[in-house]
Amino acid sequence: MNKPNLEYSPIQTSIINIYQRYQSVKEGKVATYIPELSKVDPNLFGICITTPDGQSYQAGESHHCFTIQSISKPFVYGLAIVDHGLEKIMTKVGVEPTGEAFNSIIFDEENNRPYNPMVNAGAIATTALIQGNGYEERFNRILRMFERFAGRSLEVDEAVFESERATGHRNRAIAYLELNAQMLEGNIDEHLDLYFRQCSILVNAKDLAVMAATLANNGINPITKQKAVNPEEVRAILSVMASCGMYDFSGEWLYRIGLPAKSGVGGGIVAVLPGQFGIGTFSPLLDPRGNSVRGIKVCEELSQRFKFHLFNSHPISQTCVSRIYTGAMVASKRQRRTFQRDFLDKEGEQILVYELKGDLYFATIEKLVRQLQNCQRQAKFIILDGNRVGNVNSSAITLLSDIRQWCISQKITLILTGFPQTTITRLKANNWTDEAFLGTIDNALEWCENYLLEQSNYGDKTFKDKLSLGDMDIFNTFTEEEKAAIAPLFTEVSYQPNDVIIQEGEKADRLFLLAKGMATVSLSLSDSNQRKRLTTYIPGIAFGELALFNVNVSQRTADIVADTEVTCYVLPFDKLKTLLVTNPEIYIKLLQTFGTTLVNTIKRATLEIRSLSAQ
Ligand code: GLN
């Protein structure tokens, strides 16, 4: 994406407004229990919002660096899960909110573990679980993890680190109590140093927003596109942030703001709206619970203004079916002979097309499942088109696979068209095979039609050999004498595969009857190299005849290319016109035949338009 000019962005304007509104708030106090933290300028204030595609909106001192402090806790928790897995971590650190201050000395004695990883007791236990060979390696793993989240290299504020290391007696006490209770093992002083050091990593509000946006983006950093953690860790991180992230304010925070969040005594807050964005704020003036006063106000205002609360009223899911029609209403672009057309006009009922739209997840697919269950008994083919489908979540993948099983049990052939490769890959991991996927609805319709025709011996195989002139559909109503009278005007012409039979723009002065092989009419689409198939001709079909009726324009309007070896009977229009003198009845009959074909084509097109615009 290009860098937009944010000057005119209403979002940027809102962020600036909110920043200005709370700039004058001077409530709260900077943290002093870590002596070095008391030196911070209390007026500093920065806000940043970052989207999962990497757009940031910033106001104030969003680039001023401060120590991350407790905001490190959920991220290190994620790394501990990477190291040990979700189940093992649960035995070491719980997930229950304490309702107590961040540094309280209470433990879940029943389970012999700290209550949750967001309070110091839990965070020290979490850090103790980070693997690596010695202090350096373990800290480097922590720092690299933060760098993956922030998308840049980060540093430690050595002064803050030393300051907390020298004065963090309470944290030391907590760790030793945990050691005593066998909640911790290993080198306690090393664990504590790691914990103090992770708290002293320098970040700014923009970094916090990018880190939060990485969580919003299922663990993929929106700037570097690098994976920071797996989706299962993201879920665990966001869960503990939602229930315990704001210490003894967690319940009220969820009630008022409604986003998973984490604060730190350095003055930062991160908040996440999954799938949509991350927020980072910085203002070192803290309330008695250790949460940034202005940070809370900013988040509350943002949440109210933009309705961010996770439990705001949600739109009720609509069905994902945008259109339903049968193969009798809409045919493939392949030309058919009259007898085939008549057959498909009836039997096409067995082909059902469901065009899907929007996101596929449980609630939208459930409605499709209900519609499929009601589908006509005679359905033999179901085509699900995903061309206009948005996101497909994993429950949709499971449900689509269940639909496939149901189709197999009903002896229905299920074909998916237009789905992106990523979805196809996920379905294939669920035992779907290649045959289930075709590029377009047109391909799928053609495949089903061919199948029906072959089954009833109406298939194209029945005219594999070169057709004689008299076998052509346009002569269906001609007597043998009439055929004999017109036959000498035609010459037989052969083409190799990919030969251009008719070229767009060239003079339209002859009529073609296809005797053998197949040829396709296609248009080049503007602004792409792709071509759109208009129709494919098969033996027995006439083409190029429309120019006969078009007295003003005598140029071809599309290319017709041989798909296979092709034989045509070709009749130049000027030769045809000699019939006007020698055999006018035949000339009139021929025109009448073309007229009837045209009427039928228009009728079918009208039916198709009606079917496609019905819903
Ligand atoms: N390093 C700080 C401590 O353990 C982190 C506390 C916090 O940010 N709430 O005291």
Image (spheres, helix red, strand yellow):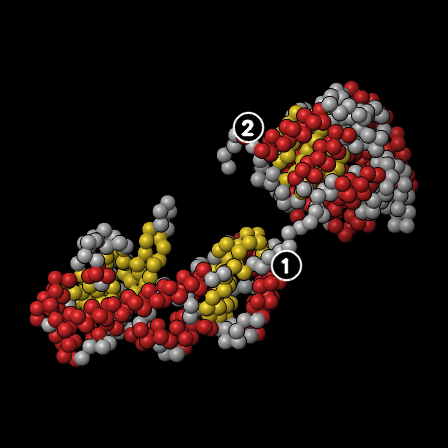
Residue at x 19% of width, y 70% of height: 590
The spot of residue 613 in percent (x, y) is: 45, 60
Q: Label for residue 27?
A: none
Which amino acid is tagged 1? Ala
Residue at the location (52% across, 73% down)?
376
Residue 363's tag is 1
- What's the residue at 22%, 63% (across, down)? 545
Among the 4 quarters of the image, the one containing residue 472: bottom left
Q: Is residue 419 left or right of residue 609?
A: right
The local crowd at label 2, few if under 14, some if 14 to 19, many if 20 or more residues have their Cα within 10 Å, is few
Which percent across, then down, holds residue 466?
24, 72
Q: Name the residue under label 2.
A: 7
Residue type for callout 2: Glu
Distance of mark 1 from mark 2, alpha carbons?
Answer: 40 Å
Q: Position of residue 64 (x, y in %)?
A: 67, 24
Residue 494 can be seen in this image: no
Q: Is mark 1 within 8 Å of ligand 1?
A: no
Q: How many labels does the image show?
A: 2
The image shows residue 217 at horizontal and vertical percentages of 62, 43
Between residues 23 and 53, which one lies in front from this camera angle? 23
